[in-house]
Every structure is written in C-alpha cells, then in structure tokens.
Amino acid sequence: MEESKKPEGGPGWINPHIQGKIAWRDDDVVISVPPKSGTTWTMNIVHQLREKGDRSFDDIYAEVKWIETMESPESTVEDMVKYIDKMPASRPRAFKTHASPPTLPFQDNVKYVVVLRNPEESIVSMKTFTSKHSQEFLKYWGMPPEAFQWADIEAFYNAFVKGVGMDKMLFGFMAEWWKLRNEPNVLLLHYKDMVSDHEGSITKISDFLGYGPYTDDEWSAILELTSFQWMKKHEARFEASSVWHIPVLEKGAMLRQGSFGMARTKDGMTEALGSDLEERGRKILTDEAAF
C-alpha cells in the first residue's frame, strides 16, 4: 500500500517519513541542519570536498539530495525512496535533511555533519525566507498566496514558534544531536565558528569525511568555491531549480548575509521574544553545557 502523500502538519512538499525507508550505504554522508542555519553552505562544502573543487555544477540540490522532499502533490513516499535507492554508486551519496534522530535514522555506517546556530538568528532568517516563496510554487502545492506573509517578527514568532512549535524543532534538534556528539561518525559544528574560521572549518569537515588528499590548487579552489562571496555571485546554483519544475523562491532568497550576531541589532528580534524563546528552549534542552 502506498504511504500517504502528505504528512501531518507542515507544507505538502515536505515529508520526513522518506528518510526512514532509505537503504543506507557505507559511504553515505548526511548533512543535518535546522532550517536557516547554514544548510545550503554546508551542502556546498561537502560537495566541493567530495569533487575536489567543482565549478561546473548547475544546482547544488542535484548534487546533494534533500531527503524530505516530494516532487509533486501526486508523488508518494515510495516514489521518492525508489529514486534515492537507485542513485549511482560511482560516488558517495550526500544528503540534506532538517531532521534529527529519531526521525532521521542514526546508522553506524553513515557519517553525519551537523550544524547548529543561535535559534534567534534562525528564526529571523526563517521569517524572511518563508516570505520569499514564489506565488506559483505556493499555488502548485495548494497554499494561499498569503500563507507565508508576516506583518513583523512578532507575528511570525506567534505563528511559527507559539503556533507551529518551531522552538521544539530547533531545541529538540540540538538536544538529540548533543546526546550523540561524541559518536565517531558525528561532526558537530556551530555556524558562528564556521563563519569566523572558514578554512579551519573546511579542514575539520575534510578530516572527518576523508575525501582527500588535495593538491594546493584543489584546496585553493575548494576555499574559493565555498566562500559566501562566490556562492552569492552564483546564487542561481543554490535555489533548488532541479527539484521542482517551477521556481521555489524569489531570486536571491536562499542566500542572505553569510554572517551572525545581527538578530537583535538588524533583523528585528526583540528582547521580549528572545527571553521567551530562551525560556522555552531551556525546557527542552536541559543540559546547560549545550546551551
């Protein structure tokens, strides 16, 4: 029997049940990052390390499969799993997910690159990102044009954090991976550290994945191709154009600033909302060291 086309809650193009049915391979790599926390950047880092510098790719989503997405309203979980299981074995597979265990199966033979970010920054970035979904894409999935429009950050916070429970997703994600942080097949990184030390972070990921060694020219190319400047200049390659036959986002919506520390100074997060978010988070992420 075919599994339900739409999961409970969330937009129709997201179905987290797919990843629970994948036949995992020994050289698989999973990039597990909450929404708006450096996912696309980390996808490109893994791809560039795997390919030793690739300037020719058209869409990062064709190189690193997002394993929570449905191709169309008519697609089934079985359709998506069949596609993933038939991916060629000529190179290691790399996947993107916004899920953490247990929704994402934890396998001893799979490597996990996990990135965490200040939840305040993720939330303000998510507000901007959701509002940039194209009207054509929303219509295709049966959503009203005003579905992701918010008057201000407080309206978004009330809808996504207090309403949908984004706090549980962000802090729950952290809590699950924090428990697994010492596993040999888990690399836990922080977005702020990645921005502050680009080459050092690429080196950590490279050592973890073991795709090298690299020549000096290959390493220089990898650093260039994973820089925010290069990615922003070629941002059409990072907008999921290969996943659906219609534009998902307005131009330039996927890559924002490539920075940190501006949630309150520039992006509208208030002290009251930040305090409420911290209070909610401490009920979920109870290890003070993780906070």
Image (cartoon, rainbow, N blue to C red):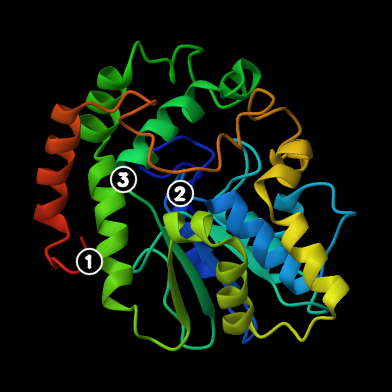
In this view, 118 is above or below 139: below
Which circle marks residue 37 in the picture?
A: 2
Residue 84 in sight from this viewpoint: yes
Residue 55 vs residue 142, the one in the foreground: 55
Q: Which quarter of the figure has residue 251?
A: top right
Tag 1: Cα neighbours inside 10 Å, few (<14), some, or many (≥20)? few
In this view, 186 is above or below 129: below
As measured in the structure, the alpha-carbon distance from the residue carrying label 2 to the one carrying label 1 is 17 Å
* Residue 223 coordinates in the image, percent (x, y): 73, 62
As measured in the structure, the alpha-carbon distance from the residue carrying label 2 to the one carrying label 3 is 8 Å
In this view, 259 is above or below 110: above
* Residue 228 coordinates in the image, percent (x, y): 66, 46
Q: Which quarter of the figure has residue 240?
A: top right
Tag 3: amino acid = Pro
* Residue 41 coordinates in the image, percent (x, y): 61, 53
Residue 20 vs residue 207, the one in the foreground: 207
Tag 2: Cα neighbours inside 10 Å, few (<14), some, or many (≥20)? many
Tag 1: amino acid = Ala
Q: Which residue carries the number 3 mark?
A: 119
Q: Which residue carries the number 1 mark?
A: 290
* Residue 81 coordinates in the image, percent (x, y): 61, 62
In this view, 80 is above or below 269: below
Residue at image location 87% in from the left, 55% down from the top: 55
Quadrant housing the C terminus: bottom left
Left or right: 250 with respect to 271?
Answer: right
Tag 3: Cα neighbours inside 10 Å, few (<14), some, or many (≥20)? many
Left or right: 261 with respect to 283?
Answer: right
Tag 2: amino acid = Ser
Label 2 residue SS: loop
